[in-house]
Image (cartoon, rainbow, N blue to C red):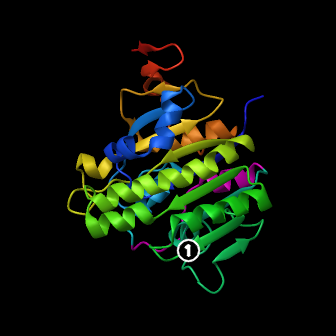
Amino acid sequence: MPNKKLIMITLDGCRYDKAIQHLGFLNHFVEKKLASLYKVLSETPSNSRPLYEVLLTGVPTHENGIYTNYNVQLSKEHSIFSLMKDAGRTTAAAAYHWVSELYNRAPFSMFEDRIQHDEAKAIQHGIFYADDTYPDSHLFADAHALITSSHPDFMYVHSMNIDDVGHKHTGNSIEYRSVVNRVDTILGIYVPRWLEMGYQVMVTSDHGMDDYGNHGGTLPEHREVPLFIISDQLEPRIGTKALEQLQLAPLVCHLLGIEKGQKMQEIDWQTLKEGMNILENETIE
């Protein structure tokens, strides 16, 4: 019986090339034929709040209306959270406060919304932070606390330190490389335990970071991000063709065993199956 629970991790601001170079724990799983690896081409504008909405609803910006980081409003789309809730499944998130503003309540109140437990909300259990320097070590500890206490079927984990350091030091700095490597160590602490608990794990990013400390545009450094998938429902594969970011939401729904949202794309299985089948060690065209 395949697992139908999933933890989706977004490493905010983590560009593809630095992920391949410095996420050694995750790349180990790929090398040992235990995980899939794809390059994902993010939607535009390649900014955080618009892409949180893309990742979690599968609806492009011109339809969902979240055009900038300053659109402080609830999403009007069906998200993975709301679809899971409607299916009678449990949701949780340890994430930046913009995620709470999109799916639970806007604007965010530090006095009322930091810790949330409400079965009526799309995100039923949440711990949210509002400081870009909130340590990733604390963030993943928050996530683990929610996983062990609330046992969510869908858990969303959103890390901010890579993006914060990238803006301060650029996406090709020693500091940026170091913070990518540091979150890899944190993943190495928690992901094995979560796998033992019966979760599938997906790790991706919203956008990248250029050599000037910016994103938001159309450069490869802005748009090319990684996707690692550890799942008993997919054959491990290294993709050779970039996957559209709009594909992630319907893929998550598939892995969770729920119907995708009506506005979500059909899953592009052809692109997902292009590349090297790690188990068979052959290239599939």
| Residue 85 pos. (x, y %) | 73, 55
User: Is residue 115 one of those drawn in magenta?
Assistant: no
Residue range in magenta is 70-87
Outermost residue toward the left in this view: 212
Residue kind at label 1, given as amino acid type: Tyr
Residue at image x 57%, y 29%?
Answer: 34
Q: Is residue 266 above or below residue 15?
A: above
At 20% from the left and 62% from the top, the residue drawn is 212
- Closer to us: 80 or 115: 115
Secondary structure type for disc 1 = strand
Dividing the image into 4 quarters, which one contains the C terminus?
Answer: top left
The answer to whether residue 67 is visible is no
From the viewer's perspective, is residue 12 above or below residue 15? below
Residue at x 64% of width, y 29% of height? 233
Residue 73 among those drawn in magenta? yes
Percent position of residue 190, x then y:
63, 51
| Image spot of residue 168 (x, y percent) | 29, 70
